[in-house]
Image (cartoon, coloured by chain):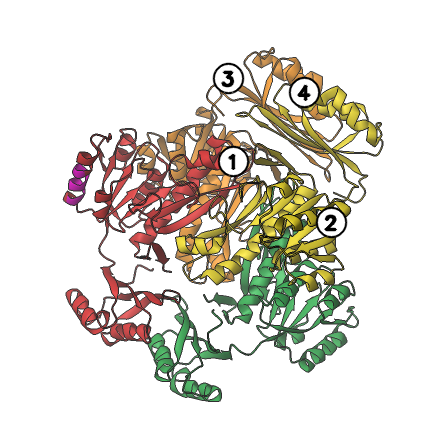
Chain colours: A green, B red, C orange, D yellow
């Protein structure tokens, strides 16, 4: 988007498919003098479900920000039985990074953050190890070391949740964080924890997927970013990508080639989330244009 | 689409960007009791141009087929200064294939045609050589041999045009046809001649692109399907794809690897054209969902 | 390879890794006045195993064809504890196709066969249905209908084995053949039955992988060609490839996009097998240059 | 490679194709008690040229390091008319980075450098702008600002050459450095300056390739890493990769998608160079396994 655009409102909805939804929503915006800058919609005919993302300029829009929600709810969302979210483009979401020992995803995100490509605030990075403390400090971000053992897990997760609340964190990115989050932790951030799994899911769920891929003799490896749910590696997939390998590649080489796929896939997923381009329905995602 | 769908109308439009076009068009369809089964739109902000494809069921639609055009023109197209096309899904477009000596694209298209994947009629195949006559006959299609020399070109193209008209051909696919069509020939089928060029355009325009790619030492080769204009290999691109190569691949191997890319890219482009998913504007294409 | 090359011998070996194997093998060929036209080797350091493919011109080679085997065995293969195979490029392998109802892989193979790209003999096609009889006949190949039910399976497989022996079939390609071969059948053609599975294995083993992929919400689909073993969809992988999909693609669209991946991956695998570029070791493949 | 390996010697050669080269070279290594850990070779039959890379452990090798060169030269290289290079894996090459204002390639390289993935020394970064000084400092690397104007170019390049010599720089990486190096500069580092061009060469040579790609309406963009020669964007290609785009992507989006391709392609090329996997012959590269 060009810099001359005013701030925008972003509406994401899904509802039972019915006639005239696009017309009703766009009419609502136009009647209030809004200029639509992006519109993408999708109808899932099997599910008989309608999905839409629309973005319009707030400049000259005749409803104040706090009027939009009640007006839209009354006029359209309720009669159409919509599930919906409204965001404003001038709010910068606050993101926490969880890392362990590997730096490639962390660096890729921090580089995009610092260059302004990834439009987030990163108040803190949490890690169960101290290995990446120096990297994080380099970028002027607070590093919080929270070691986890089986015995301390519950207590330490409570501590993490407090820290996240204290820093008003909107969503969490697991950048090769090697701990499994408990159900109660995840329940605090539904559809707001993004993980990168180092395989082409659903192949090679769980630990050591590159070893499993090597043992199976696949010719292509992959990485999968997904929203975390309480089922391990089974949450809604946001993005995937792959790299070709050969019999020359041992496990170490798979890990090396995989790193490039992981970091790009995770960063793309985070940017889709930040740009409000994702929508979850029944454990699957719609990724808008 | 499931078989239970009734026949549909497909509308493709582009016009100067302006407020409320989506609402106006969808409202036109809904008011006449049409059920929209697909809608995709795009706004090019640099060009300030709006593009849209919408498809709705004709069953229960309150306008007769021959009423749609005048009604839409009067109510929406003219006031909005639209360029537009209307098609009906139960009309099967009539396609002519032009080939020379290579069979891979021809086979790929005929296999899709015979299995019902590519929804066209193919009344005839024209070739400047006799090499593929047997292949074409196998599929029960008329093969017409029209040899071309520099001296006979103009006259032979006239003959081709007569044959095409006689068979009411809607569009032409050059499936590795190794003759350059004259401007006057192309002018008869604007945006209705699809070519496959065996390179990743705009690299390696013209003859022997695989030799040129090998000489340059590229690490990836490609193929490009495009609408034919009077500028050689410079028409609007419909689709492209690539294949990785290595220093082990000599020109013959490039040609072999390239064949698979060519045939898939050409068939995808033809199917996009047949499904009315393409729209040309200023030497570029919009490819709808 | 240029047409001017004389016929070649192709040797594929694997053995415990040890010093000097490349030197010993190439020296054996050179001492007998052979001109090496291709050499590729690989050492798996974890398995401490050495793999090699070497191809040399028979013109001027000082050993007669039937002398090569005993000479090589005595001088090199036995002392080095090699597992090895020797082939001559002027022998055209005899391939049987097994199909059911879908034609895309069948057409892709037959088109390559007829154009001379795939250097095989195809004496017959076996099918448990009659749907593709006409397609096969078009190419002048014998079509044999062998319906299979749970009750008749054992008996019918015996019949198939007789037919295959009678036609001196070297290897079998399952071009979307929708029957599972019994263990005893497969045992007759070890590393000589090639299947295409319509998923990115090991994801979505078994029936209806596109339905499973759609249900899981993956963003990329794939296809896998592999040698058939008695474990369903678990044999050594020869080749894989993928295609990107979106939330717009329903199951029918996945099946359509998948067809292109399946046919290309299967044909590439068959050509690698025919060119003696594959080598199986411990349920994995080495694919030589 | 596992950490237990001793240091290795790496030999890259090319020469007129002739019988027995592999045997002679491997025999030379074995006779001196060397254990080969990697061997890759290629014969270009059109050029009648042989290419080879071989790597062996120095532990127990019976020639001292300074004896290898004269021994090999006398015994093999001279009689076979070889062009060749010998390196030792325990020498870490010294690399200078040239940057301008964009940080994505710089970050990608520095992250790999710091994590130990890219085995180089980076004594300094040179830039014609100050924008990235802070980024470079963060990594504890010397940043040298050398502004260039048409008037000062010759003089400033002399200064750069002095600095490079002073720091014993082995090779230079242009990580989106937006100045064209003069012929005399490049002549000092033949096959030792690596550039990333932000297009799929040879398409869109020169300035603003994303604008040109957008104007042409391509469906795929790419990036190309190559050795710099005195012909602009025409040097030997080391690696290329691509990304799919659609009509929704404006120039800014192309630039964003392109950044990910650029950084991965450049880093892969640098690592191939550092691992002594590249070999230049007649403006093309051989990239060994």
Circle 3 packing at 10 Å, graded few (<14), some (14-19), many (20+), is some
> In terms of secondary structure, what is the magenta stretch mainly?
helix
Q: Position of residue A207 (x, y in %)?
A: 68, 57
Mark 2 secondary-structure assignment: helix
Q: Label 2, on which residue?
A: D163
Cα separation, mark 2 vs mark 1, equals 63 Å
Q: Quadrant of residue C97?
A: top left
Mark 3 secondary-structure assignment: loop
Whichever of labels 3 and 1 marks the residue nearer the N terminus, that label is 3
Which chain does the residue under circle 1 lie in? C
Q: Residue at x 27, y 64 (%)?
A: B11
Q: Label 1, on which residue?
A: C193
Q: Is residue A210 visible?
A: yes
Q: Is residue C77 visible?
A: no
Whichever of labels 4 and 2 marks the residue nearer the N terminus, that label is 4
Does the magenta run of residues contain C78?
A: no
Which of the two marks, 4 or 3, is nearer to us in this view? 4
Mark 2 touches mark 1? (CB < 8 Å): no
Q: Label 3, on which residue?
A: C6
Q: Label 4, on which residue?
A: D80
Cα separation, mark 3 vs mark 1, equals 30 Å
Q: Residue at x 46, y 55 (%)?
A: C210
The residue segment tinted magenta is B158-165
Q: Position of residue A254 (x, y in %)?
A: 65, 48
Camera-side residue: B269 or A109? A109
Which of the two marks, 4 or 2, is nearer to us in this view? 2
Which of the two marks, 2 or 3, is nearer to us in this view? 2
Q: Would residue B140 be found to the left or right of residue A213 on screen?
A: left
């Amino acid at each position: 988007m060009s810099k001359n655009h005013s701030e925008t409102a972003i509406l994401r909805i899904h509802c039972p498919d019915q006639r005239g939804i696009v017309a009703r929503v766009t009419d609502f915006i136009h009647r209030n003098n809004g200029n639509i800058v992006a519109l993408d919609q999708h109808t899932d005919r099997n599910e008989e479900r309608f999905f839409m993302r629309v973005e319009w300029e707030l400049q000259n829009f005749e409803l104040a920000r706090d009027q939009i929600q009640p007006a839209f709810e009354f006029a359209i969302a309720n009669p159409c039985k919509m599930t919906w979210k409204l965001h404003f483009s001038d709010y910068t979401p606050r993101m926490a990074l969880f890392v362990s020992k590997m730096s490639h995803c962390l660096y890729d995100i921090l580089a995009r953050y610092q260059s302004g490509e990834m439009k987030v605030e990163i108040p803190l990075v949490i890690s169960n190890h101290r290995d990446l403390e120096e990297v994080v400090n380099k970028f002027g971000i607070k590093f919080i070391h929270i070691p986890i053992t089986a015995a301390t897990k519950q207590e330490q997760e409570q501590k993490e949740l407090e820290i996240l609340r204290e820093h008003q964190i909107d969503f969490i990115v697991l950048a090769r964080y090697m701990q499994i989050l408990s159900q109660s932790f995840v329940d605090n951030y539904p559809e707001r924890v993004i993980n990168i799994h180092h395989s082409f899911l659903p192949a090679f769920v769980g630990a050591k997927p590159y070893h499993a891929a090597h043992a199976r003799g696949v010719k292509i490896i992959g990485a999968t970013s997904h929203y975390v749910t309480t089922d391990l590696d089974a949450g809604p997939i946001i993005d995937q990508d792959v790299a070709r390998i050969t019999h020359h590649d041992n496990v170490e080489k798979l890990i090396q080639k995989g790193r490039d796929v992981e970091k790009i896939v995770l960063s793309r997923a985070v940017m889709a989330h930040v740009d409000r381009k994702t929508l979850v329905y029944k454990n699957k995602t719609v990724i808008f244009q």
